């Protein structure tokens, strides 16, 4: 449960921006009015819904977190970067899977772990990267490497145009991203 007071304009604005915590999934959650005006009810419904669009796809961000994790030379840097990988990977695979909406952060993590179209070992590796499964540094590093290899290979095969940025599709297709990460 979350308690907050927002203006109708703020609620409308939020409905147009992805939730940072949703791992790229669309959000649709219940809400209740504590106090409202007729105009607010007309604009947002009764009961109101907390809806937010899915997050944007940025392969570049995932590759940046991968580079940081794979090159980390201390446990804190490794785990921070691994967590960044875990947060940016699900959105890249989202459109290869059945549409999902989530209501909260826990549902977002569960939805990400349950993606059917994902690299081998996805759920175990993602759980390690998101720190929802216990792991020593060696296991975190191994999970980061497997997930980086698996996600890039899957995207090259099934969604080479996942990121609209110029040239990144070519770098995905020709192996430049793996070479950059030291995986090739």
Image (cartoon, rainbow, N blue to C red):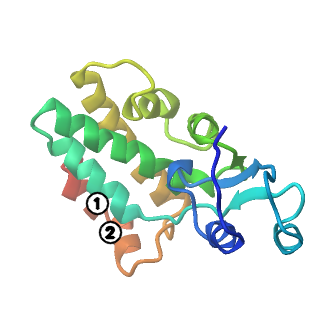
Residue that extends furthest to the left in the rendered view of this protein: 73
Specify whether residue 31 is in view. yes
Q: Residue at x 72, y 71 (%)?
A: 8
Left or right: 170 in relation to 36:
left
Which comes sooner in the sequence, label 2 or label 1?
2
26 up-or-down from 136: above or below: below
Locate residue 83, reporting x and y percent.
Answer: 35, 40
- State the residue at coordinates (67%, 37%): 1
Q: Is residue 174 left or right of residue 125?
A: left
The residue under label 1 is: 177
Considering the numbered disc 2 on the image, is that residue within a helix, a strand or a loop? helix
Residues under numbered marks 2 and 1 in contact, where contact means CB atoms less than 8 Å apart: yes
Residue for point 20% across, 58% down: 180
Q: Is residue 149 in view?
A: no
In the foreground, 107 or 12: 12
Disc 2 crowd rating (10 Å Cα; few below 14, some 14-19, many 20+) is some
Percent position (x, y) of residue 73? 9, 37
Is 101 in front, or is 169? 101
In three-dimensional space, the C-alpha distance between marks 2 and 1, rounded to whole angstroms, equals: 6 Å
**Label 2 sits on residue:** 171
Residue 156 percent coordinates (x, y): 45, 59
Along the viewing direction, whichever of 37 and 138 lies nearer the viewer:
37
**Which quarter of the picture shows residue 74?**
top left
Query: Badge 1: few (under 14), some or many (20 or more) residues near its Cα, within 10 Å?
Result: many
Residue 32: mark in rendering: none
Q: Position of residue 150 (x, y in %)?
A: 42, 43
Left or right of 41: which side holds 118?
left
Above or below, comparing residue 136 to residue 142 in the picture = above
Image quadrant in which you'd find residue 112: top right
């Amino acid at each position: 449960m979350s308690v907050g007071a927002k203006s109708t304009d703020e609620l409308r604005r939020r409905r147009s921006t992805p939730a940072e915590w949703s791992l790229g999934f669309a959000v649709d959650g219940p809400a209740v009015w504590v106090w409202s005006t007729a105009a607010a009810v007309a604009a947002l419904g009764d009961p109101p819904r907390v809806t937010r669009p899915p997050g944007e796809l940025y392969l570049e961000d995932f590759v940046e977190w991968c580079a940081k994790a794979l090159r980390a030379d201390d446990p804190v840097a490794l785990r921070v970067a691994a967590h960044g990988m875990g947060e940016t990977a699900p959105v890249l695979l989202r459109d290869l899977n059945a549409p999902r909406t989530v209501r909260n952060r826990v549902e977002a993590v569960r939805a990400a772990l349950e993606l059917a179209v994902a690299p081998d070992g996805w759920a175990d590796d993602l759980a390690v990267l998101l720190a929802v499964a216990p792991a020593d540094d060696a296991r975190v590093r191994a999970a980061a490497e497997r997930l980086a290899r698996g996600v890039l290979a899957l995207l090259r095969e099934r969604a080479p145009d996942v990121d609209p940025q110029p040239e990144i599709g070519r770098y995905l297709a020709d192996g430049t991203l793996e070479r950059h990460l030291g995986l090739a």
